[in-house]
Amino acid sequence: MAYSNVPRRLKWKDVLSLLWRSFFIQTGWNFKSMISIGFCFALYPIGRKVCHTKKEYIAFLKRHLGFFNAHPYFASYAIGATARLELEHAANQKPSIELIEKFKNALIGPLGAVGDQCCWAVMRPAALIFGLTGLKIAPNVFWKTVVLLLTFILYNIPHIYIRIKGIRDGYETGFEVYKKIRIDTYGKLVQLFKIIGVIGIGMVFIWTFQQAFIVHWHVSIMFVLSFVLGFGLRVKRNMFYTPVLVSMILAIVIGLL
Amino acid sequence: MLQLLGLSLSGAIILLDSTAAFQMLIAQPLFACPLLGFLGGNIDLGFEMGFLLQLIWLANMPVGAAIIPEGEFGSVAGVILALRLTEQLPELKHFIIFIALIYAVFVSYLGAKSVTFIRNQNQHYLQHILKRLNRGNRIKIGLVILNALIFSAAVFFIIIFVLTIVFENIFYPILKSTPLTVANRIGMIGKISILGVGMGLTVTLLKDKRLWPLYVLGMLIGGGLMLYGLF
């Protein structure tokens, strides 16, 4: 469902404007409307285009300050698509405001699910493991700084790519954007990060064990004990604080003996 | 005092990257600790704490709207305290790192509370905006965002600043009275136990069975590099 009189693609200037604002999408995060304040801020350049009177502008803000939530990176799909629909509505009075709101609500689930699976569950931990591995290899401050820069680039190039692609795809497809919001779209990227992350974990594991082993065999037992505690309680009970605190207390007790 | 003010302010600004803006990993301990270490004049300490804290928090990062104890907040507070204490007692570096790690874990609870507080305040902003719009007044949405950012940073700044002063005064006499050998022993064993528990938590990530050969490959590469370094 597409309506005429609206450019098929966004100009780069507009994409960059939406991109910059999308970085603040979670600034006004609240329990009532979640990320709606940030979403409204991101759409402001579109609001300026479609609202010609004060009344229209107030109505625009009010309808986008309703409940909305999404993964912060993948919210750019909603920003792009809503931008298009708002422009179409201003040009043709179609689609209706109600339809735009229903459409936004329908996007909440997929945007959150795909974003969490892709970015929070894989990309972010994998990039950080890459950084940890690099810090273990790097011999001095210079190389450690280089590692951090590489980690930053490794994570943020895909991160910003997702945001830009989201805005552009969302704008170009409008209502059809749901076809683009799939984990398969980023399948290769996610797979690459998984490989980096898993190999990194293997490497860091061996090095940390070696670090414990070379001190004293008592200390390597402490390492193994803490490892088993952390792994076991995390897998069996999904605990975090208990293993961390117990191993800290154990370290104090053994240190005092 | 001026240094503490500067570090707390820098920490508060870095923490905005956690959820309020950008989310480019800068608030993660791996980046935040060396940055603060650099600003505090001890980048090595920053790297060391960044590594250990990242290892602990890696498996416990917030997803979506969930509020869990804020590891990023705890890490920033922890590294600032460690920087302050090592400046006064450099011979107890390892023990101070261990104490700062324990402190970071406890303080992360306050981080979670501060996030809830900030989100409640944002709700007040929202209600205020809606009231003004219902009265037919224009609002500048950019100013709302700026206010929310400043408020978040201010909350982080105040909590970190006050906590550092309080705990510096609590820990300093304890550290000073601990015998050096005991302190070093606890520091060393504590660091190893953090590495162990951190690895135990981290290996639970990416636990797809199809990836197990890659774990082994990683261990082989790591082992190979280790032997190459040894011989």
Image: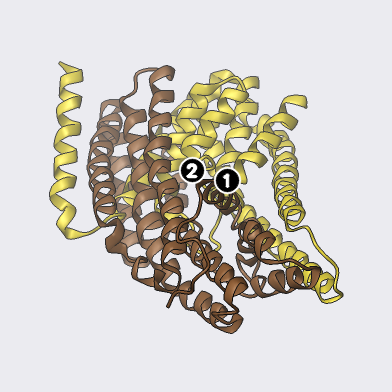
Front-lying residue, B106 or A180 = A180
The answer to whether residue B178 is left or right of residue B4 is left
Which quadrant, please, contains the C terminus of chain A?
top left
Q: Residues within 10 Å of mark 2 (few under 14, many from 20)?
A: many
Which quadrant, please, contains the N terminus of chain A?
bottom left
Q: Which chain is brown?
A: A
The image's mark for residue A207 is: none
Front-lying residue, A115 or A250 = A115
Using the image, determine if residue A224 lies above or below residue A39.
above
Q: Quadrant of residue A237?
A: bottom left
The image's mark for residue B25 is: 2
Task: Check disc 1 and report the residue beneath it.
Answer: B17
Q: Residues within 10 Å of mark 1 (few under 14, many from 20)?
A: many
Q: What kind of element bears circle 1?
A: loop
Q: How far is the residue under mark 1 from the one under mark 2?
A: 7 Å
Q: Residue at x 12, y 49 (%)?
A: B213
- Chain identity of mark 2: B
The answer to whether residue A241 is left or right of residue A131 is right
